[in-house]
Amino acid sequence: MSGRIGLTPSPRRPPRRAGLKQHVSPRPRSTSRPGPRLDDELAAIRRLVGQVLQSSRRVEARSAQAEAPATTAGPLFDLSLKLLESQVSTDLADEVTGAVRDELGAGELADPATVRDATLRQIARRIGVVSTPQPPGKRADGRPSVIALIGPTGVGKTTTVAKLAATCKLRYGKRVGLITADTYRIAAVEQLRTYAEIVGIPLKVVLAPQDIPGAIDALADCDTIILDTAGRSQRDAARLDELGEFLRAAEPDQIQLVLSLASAESVIAAAADRYGALGPDRLLLTKLDEAVDYSVVLNTARRVGLPISFVTTGQEVPDHIEAASAERLARLVLDGGSAWQAISGGR
Ligand SMILES: Nc1nc2c(ncn2[C@@H]2O[C@H](COP(=O)(O)OP(=O)(O)OP(=O)(O)O)[C@@H](O)[C@H]2O)c(=O)[nH]1
Ligand SMILES: [Mg+2]
């Protein structure tokens, strides 16, 4: 986004790379996979071969009818393998391939560019994104709207609160206020206070859920309030309950579930399941720049079933955040690191 203010107070670890282009690091994939995964993939490959053979027969039948030379369905097979290689779940890979096969005609299935476009379209269709990323303004009753960010420890909530606040103020011209309910670590409050001072927005600190209404009253002039919450282990049921109490007191207009793409997919899945109980209505994906497999975007979008609002792409506040685009994310899923280079290299 424009209006760069370039601040990164006391990051828990130093920024690893200086420039965006250097963020580009398609990771080598592990070659040693556990048995069940290999079995799944073999089963999927068998299914795909079956589909492609069916498809070839259809193509040949149609070609024979039209007295045109028979074509093969090779491009679809290649893309199916690419999806599996990119760690897209076998069910989703099957679904996408099947949808492309149904969508395209005989001649189209033989054209690699057409098959690729259709595959990207089918992937994008399965990544729901928020259609209006701009934050809500005041409520009908004149009170500020509230956006709460929740999620596991260290996924980037506080950094993202600062990025969102700066985006709301600088890009959308909103009066923004911040509330932090993360008082377990003094450093956490200080981290957000520093951001708030640099962006020039008010911050209120709440110690208990019952402090929230007073903090909202104190920020009544604002259009939007962004609420930062403390990270909780998804295994810590008591702390998750307490987080629920903060949310009930804040009555948020939006609850954004923040998940990091740098985490293992099984960790993301467990967090999504636990935090899902708190009623998030949007998914915000962080650390796209650190994702090992971009397929996790598609797999997680399907698992969580919430529209993606924003993705974050690095440590810098406020620059490294963008509204989610299904088309761009689909390219990352299909092309992995090379798409990331193309996307991030443009900035
Ligand atoms: N590479 C990368 N790092 C990020 C991104 N967003 C945040 N971080 C880093 O992730 C680390 C944790 O960020 P925080 O914002 O403190 O995470 P948090 O979720 O608030 O953590 P807790 O409050 O402990 O739950 C910091 O070093 C951030 O700079 C991102 O998009 N990409
Ligand atoms: Mg935090």
Image (cartoon, helix red, strand yellow):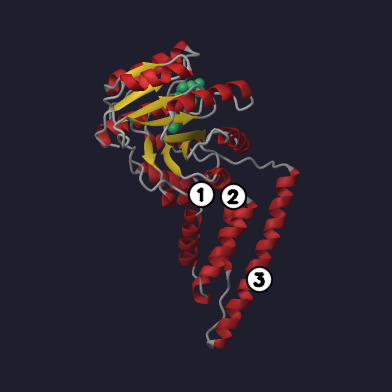
User: Which quadrant: the N terminus?
Assistant: top left
Residue type for callout 2: Val
Residue drawn at x 55%, y 46% as measured from the top left: 295
On the picture, is 173 further left or further right than 56? Answer: left
Circles 3 and 1 in contact, beta carbons < 8 Å: no
Could you say which disc has been placed on residue 333 in the image?
1
Circles 2 and 3 in contact, beta carbons < 8 Å: no
Circle 3 residue: 53
Secondary structure category for the residue under label 3: helix
CA–CA distance in space, label 2 to label 3: 22 Å
Secondary structure category for the residue under label 1: helix
Residue drawn at x 41%, y 26% as measured from the top left: 227
Is 109 situated above or below 217?
below
Residue type for callout 3: Leu
Residue 231 appears at what percent x and percent y?
52, 23
Is 10 situated above or below 2?
above
Counting residues from the start of the chain, the first of labels 2 and 3 encountered is 3
Residue drawn at x 53%, y 87% as measured from the top left: 66
Counting residues from the start of the chain, the first of labels 2 and 1 encountered is 2
Structural crowding at the residue carrying mark 2, measured as other residues with C-alpha within 10 Å and reported as few (<14), some (14–19) or many (≥20): many
Circles 2 and 1 in contact, beta carbons < 8 Å: yes
Q: Is mark 3 within 8 Å of ligand 1?
A: no
Closer to us: 126 or 84: 126
Could you say which disc has been placed on residue 88 in the image?
2
**Count of marks placed on residues:** 3
CA–CA distance in space, label 2 to label 1: 8 Å
Residue 218 appears at what percent x and percent y?
31, 19
On the picture, is 318 further left or further right than 254? Answer: left
